[in-house]
């Protein structure tokens, strides 16, 4: 049997559907409650519009976040004791100083937050159990680039679950009962109305405010937000000039910086003993390296050599701050890839994306076992024979897919074995050892069919398309 097949790998199938450490009864109640929360919009006190757990480091420190209609923040019950949630962001503008450069967005909701230390046994919101991280993370769901594209001439039908399948993809991913979900960035794509000549433009709200965030991310994500804690990675759609206000309000790791939207946030490490994640903010990188792929209709951004050098310096400094705390078995999470390939916007040739980030960081520490990214709207697994960390791209989360590039035989003189699939889907990784150095992964389609099987060990990423 191919690696990653069967009842979803690692642990001999003990985490297959209908079994596992999160009992099926508690899981069903959590999913049911998630649906209830997302459907309630009435005036009841502190009725959650969305609720989730997010890992923000260091260690496995959890940030519990709740969105309410504008009422006071609710209380949590943490290991039997009451814990008052604090206001993370009030309704209204978040960054007064940057209002001129940021798009207008309406946020008539309040965001509440409470930090829960690692080792906490349970946390309840309105007597409902929240999905805190287990003592050992053994199953991980990974995807990115999930929003429904509405902008100019290249659009998706957000009301068609085949054209934009994120809701059913998230529901299938929740059924796997992961210990952790990793979103590698780009949450909001309903940015601007269609061009006038588009005959079948979907009748949906566009922009950057709460109602668009709710439709594009929070509502379809509800079952998966209730199933496991998440690590959120910032994408280039969450820059200050785009959906940045929503990013800092809802998903950024630290508390929002008052009055100023940061182009690049500090990096951080999430760790469990010898296994962990480096979370890197590369949102500004795509604009600095020439904009989007050939398939994207975004405007190109004018950049100068000095601007690119300044960004390289910022990336280098931010990485140096966390380099000493990287565990021996670590995944580097960054929206913009280090070594992926794509179809160029102008030449239509296969190009390497991107050198700026790779040059800024330099040689990665030996503990980095794999780079996990999105940005390119397809699946890519590029293995370099352990000379450098392999590159995994899972930009498959339901945004309009890109043109498929060629599978190169080398990148920068280093032989590479590439597996590339132009499909929607999500990836499930199962840990098969105690150290977190060996993993089996399967890419599943939006209809839950296996698309590819992978094995990761000692910086070797071996992937094969499913039969």
Image (tube, rainbow, N blue to C red):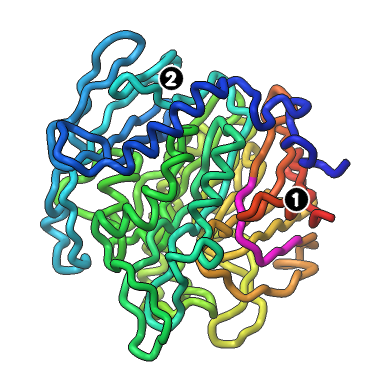
Q: How many marks?
A: 2
N-terminal-most mark, 2 or 1: 2
Q: Position of residue 455 (x, y in %)?
A: 77, 43
Q: Secondary structure at mark 1?
A: loop
Q: Residue at x 43, y 19 (%)?
A: 118
Disc ID at residue 360: none
Magenta region includes residue 424: yes
**Front residue (pair 355, 146):** 146
Q: Where, quadrant-wise, is the C terminus in this rendering?
A: bottom right
The residue that disc 1 covers is: 387
Q: Is residue 302 visible?
A: no
Does the magenta segment cover residue 336? no
* Cα separation between marks 2 and 1: 34 Å
User: Can residue 111 be seen in the rendering of this structure?
Assistant: yes
Give 45 or 258, whichever is nearer the viewer: 45
Instruction: Residue at 75% x, 53% y: name it.
Output: 452
Q: Secondary structure at mark 2?
A: loop
Magenta stretch bounds: 419-427
**Residue 75 pos. (x, y %):** 22, 22
In the rendered image, the residue lying farthest to the top is 80
| Image position of 24 (left or right of 350) | left
Disc number at residue 118? 2
Q: Nearer the viewer, residue 418 or 452?
A: 452
Residue 433 position, x and y percent, is 74, 26
Question: Which of label 2 and label 1 is nearer to you?
Answer: 2
């Amino acid at each position: 049997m191919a690696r990653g097949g069967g009842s979803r790998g690692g642990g001999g199938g003990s985490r297959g559907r209908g079994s596992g450490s999160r009992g099926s009864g508690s899981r069903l109640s959590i999913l049911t409650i998630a649906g209830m929360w997302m459907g309630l919009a009435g005036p009841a006190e502190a009725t959650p519009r969305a609720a989730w757990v997010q890992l923000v480091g260091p260690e496995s420190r959890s940030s519990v976040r709740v969105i309410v209609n504008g009422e006071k923040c609710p209380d949590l019950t943490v290991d039997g004791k009451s814990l008052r949630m604090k206001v993370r962001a009030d309704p209204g503008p978040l960054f007064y100083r940057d209002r001129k450069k940021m798009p207008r967005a309406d946020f008539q909701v309040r965001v509440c937050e409470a930090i829960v230390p690692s080792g906490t046994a349970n946390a309840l919101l309105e007597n409902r159990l929240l999905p805190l991280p287990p003592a050992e993370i053994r199953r991980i769901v990974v995807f990115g680039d999930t929003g429904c594209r509405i902008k100019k001439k290249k659009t998706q039908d957000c009301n068609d679950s085949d054209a934009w399948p994120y809701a059913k993809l998230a529901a299938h991913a929740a059924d796997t009962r992961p210990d952790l979900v990793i979103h590698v960035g780009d949450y909001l794509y309903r940015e601007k109305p269609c061009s006038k000549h588009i005959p079948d433009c979907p009748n949906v709200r566009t922009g950057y405010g709460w109602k668009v965030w709710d439709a594009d991310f929070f509502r379809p994500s509800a079952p998966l937000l209730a199933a496991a804690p998440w690590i959120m990675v910032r994408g280039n759609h969450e820059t200050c000039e785009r959906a940045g206000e929503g990013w800092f309000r809802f998903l950024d790791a630290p508390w929002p910086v008052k009055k100023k939207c940061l182009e690049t946030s500090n990096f951080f490490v999430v760790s469990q003993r010898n296994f962990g994640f480096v979370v890197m903010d590369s949102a500004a990188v795509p604009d600095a390296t020439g904009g989007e792929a050939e398939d994207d209709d975004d405007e190109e951004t004018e950049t100068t050599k000095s601007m690119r050098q300044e960004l390289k310096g910022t990336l280098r400094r931010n990485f140096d701050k966390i380099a000493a705390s990287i565990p021996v078995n670590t995944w580097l999470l960054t929206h913009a890839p280090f070594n992926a390939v794509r179809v160029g916007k102008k030449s239509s040739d296969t190009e390497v994306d991107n050198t700026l980030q790779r040059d800024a960081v330099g040689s990665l520490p030996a503990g980095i076992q794999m780079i996990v990214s999105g940005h390119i709207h397809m699946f890519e697994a590029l293995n370099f024979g352990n000379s450098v960390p392999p590159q995994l791209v899972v930009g498959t989360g339901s945004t309009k897919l890109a043109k498929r590039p060629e599978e190169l035989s080398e990148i920068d003189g280093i032989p590479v074995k590439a597996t590339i699939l132009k499909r929607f889907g999500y990836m499930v990784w199962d840990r098969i050892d105690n150290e977190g150095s060996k993993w089996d992964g399967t890419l599943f389609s939006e209809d839950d069919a296996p698309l590819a099987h992978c094995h990761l060990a000692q910086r070797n990423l071996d992937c094969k398309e499913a039969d």
